Amino acid sequence: MKKGIVRTNRTITLSLPSELADKIDEMIKEEGRNRSELLREALRHYIEEKEWQRIYRYGEMKAREKEITEDQVEDIIDARRN
């Protein structure tokens, strides 16, 4: 690599069951994308979902600590906004 050039992507090797790989190949043909684009998007969605799950679990934990019911949450948010 030339001095001063920073590579922003990393190449990884991924092993998939044949059936899943075939489905991915079908999707890339249908959508006119390549595997990397499709898998990057899928992984972004997966990571986003996991992050929201973590946030939700944290909220549930804090609500239990403060003995707040799900029905009270919207009222508390509205009161805080006002």
Image: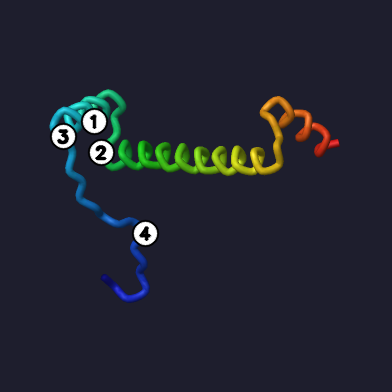
Whether residue 75 is situated above or below residue 51 in the rendered picture: above
Give the crowd class for mark 3: few <14, some 14-19, many >=20 residues within 10 Å. Answer: few
Q: Which residue is mark 3?
A: 17
What is the CA distance from the residue labelled 2 to the residue labelled 1? 7 Å
Give the crowd class for mark 4: few <14, some 14-19, many >=20 residues within 10 Å. Answer: few
Residue at point 23% right, 27% down? 29
Q: Looking at numbered disc 1 in the image, what kind of residue is underneath it? A: Ile
What is the CA distance from the residue labelled 1 to the residue labelled 3? 11 Å
The single residue placed furthest to the left in the displayed view is 18
Q: What's the mark number on residue 8?
A: 4
Question: In screen coordinates, is 2 left or right of 52?
Answer: left
Look at the numbered discs 2 and 1 and tell me whether their residues touch, using CB distance below 8 Å: yes
Disc nearer the start of the sequence (2/3)? 3
Disc nearer the start of the sequence (1/3)? 3
Q: Which residue is mark 2?
A: 35
Q: Looking at numbered disc 3 in the image, what kind of residue is underneath it? A: Pro
Question: In screen coordinates, is 62 left or right of 37?
Answer: right
Q: Looking at numbered disc 2 in the image, what kind of residue is underneath it? A: Arg
Look at the numbered discs 4 and 2 and tell me whether their residues touch, using CB distance below 8 Å: no
**Foreground of the two, 62 or 21:** 62
Q: Which residue is mark 1?
A: 24
Q: Tell me which corner region of the image, top left, top right, bottom left or bottom right, holds residue 75.
A: top right
